[in-house]
Image (cartoon, rainbow, N blue to C red):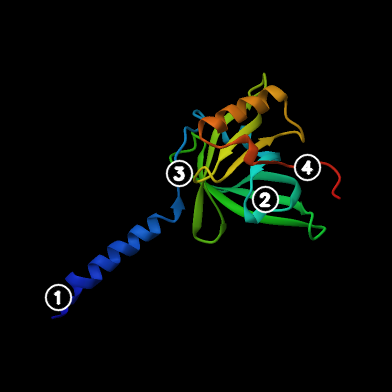
Amino acid sequence: MKNTFNQTFKKPLLALSMLGLSACTILDEPVDVVKPFELNQYLGTWYEIARLDHSFERNMSNVTAQYSVDGDKVVVINKGFKQDKQQWDQAEGKAYFINGNNQGLLKVSFFGPFYGAYQIHDIVQDAQGYYTDSLVIGPNNDYAWILSRTATIDPEIKQRFITKLNALSISENKLIWVAQGDQQ
């Protein structure tokens, strides 16, 4: 009877549990990512130029993301000004490479064991190879960010990223252009 219980219930439950744990990194819609990718060129501060609407950044302006390394993880500190509450808000997360550190595909978490994909879909480099602008897609096309090292973006780069978003069926009309500057 005990052996039957193990075969009937325990092993399938264990298999389902393992499958559930492996699904903790959400990657619903993979996109092409930057290859080769150099993390050292990505570290530092980025300004959020545009994003798709989602609850954790709603009503935020002056949004920045700071990337640094701590051991084997990338520390992510997102900061922005909540217009509706008239206060600064900050969240700290951690990210790890999914398929090696030579491509722009990471898993990021701000909420414990649950990770979402952070797919660096396109990147612009200056003459020295330093990353200056980035187009990031989340675990699916409901999440997208245009980032820049400065609070504004060159119109040609902006159009390049919008064209790439359109190719992914993400409409420019859905983008929120983030106010950067003095908080209101």
> How many angstroms separate mark 3 from mark 2 (CA)?
20 Å
Disc with the residue nearer the chain's start (1 vs 2): 1
Q: Nearer the viewer, residue 44 or 161?
A: 161
Which residue: 16% across, 79% down?
2
- Tags 3 and 4 touching, CB below 8 Å: no
Q: Which residue is mark 1?
A: 3
Residue denoted by label 2:
77
| The furthest residue to the bottom | 1
Residue type at mark 2: give it.
Answer: Ile
Q: Residues within 10 Å of mark 2 (few under 14, many from 20)?
A: some
- The image position of residue 180, as x and y in percent, is 79, 41
Q: Residues within 10 Å of mark 1 (few under 14, many from 20)?
A: few
User: Nearer the N terminus, badge 4 or badge 1?
Assistant: 1
The x, y position of residue 42, in whole percent, is 62, 35
Distance from disc 3 to disc 4, alpha carbons, whole Å, reads 32 Å
N-term-proximal mark, 4 vs 2: 2
Secondary element at tag 1:
helix
- In the rendered structure, which disc, 3 or 4, sits on the residue that comes first in sequence? 3
